[in-house]
Amino acid sequence: MKINLDIKWYQWIFGMLSSALAVLFVHDGFATFTEQEPQAIGVIALLVGGALLTTLCLTFGLRWSIRKIGRNTNQK
């Protein structure tokens, strides 16, 4: 069985950063409710959640655009 993965080095970095931000977001979300400060989740959502969405868009957006460019060059 041959697995053909064409993932660039910067996509790995964005993926690892996204994973770390997701873990931080979930951890801080549960921690704010444990400490009985649920209003703090708004600040966490803006800071960590915004960065998480940005890195996820970069991770999957770059992957999608590279595939699309590869398909367009093969069709010509």
Image: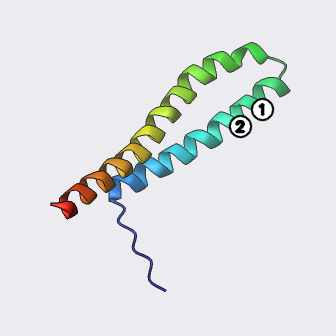
Q: Residue furthest front?
A: 75
Q: Please, which colouring scheme is shown?
A: rainbow
Hey, what amino acid is under mark 2?
A: His
> What residue type is disc 1 on?
Phe
**Is 46 located above or below residue 18 in the figure?**
above
Q: Is residue 56 left or right of residue 46?
A: left
Name the element at disc 2.
Answer: helix
View extreme (bottom): residue: 1
Residue under numbered circle 2: 27
Residue 64, percent from left and from top: 37, 49
Q: Position of residue 13 (x, y in %)?
A: 41, 52
The reply to whether discs 1 and 2 touch (Cβ–Cβ < 8 Å) is yes
| Residue 64, numbered circle | none
Q: Decide: few, some or many residues near mark 1? Use Cα within 10 Å; few <14, some 14-19, many ≥20.
A: few
Quick one: quadrant of the C terminus? bottom left
Identify the residue under disc 1.
30
Q: Residue furthest top?
A: 39
Q: Where is residue 72 drawn, in percent x and y?
A: 22, 55
Q: Position of residue 70 (x, y in %)?
A: 25, 59
- Residue at image x 51%, y 26%? 50
Residue at screen point 37% across, 62% down:
7
Q: Is residue 24 left or right of residue 68?
A: right
Q: Is residue 67 above or below residue 2?
A: above
Give the alpha-carbon distance from disc 1 to disc 2, as whole Å.
5 Å
The image shows residue 58, relative to residue 42, as above or below, that is: below
Using the rendered view, name the quadrant where residue 3 is placed: bottom left
Residue sitting at x 27%, y 59%:
71
Describe residue 61's horizontal placement relative to residue 37 as left or right: left
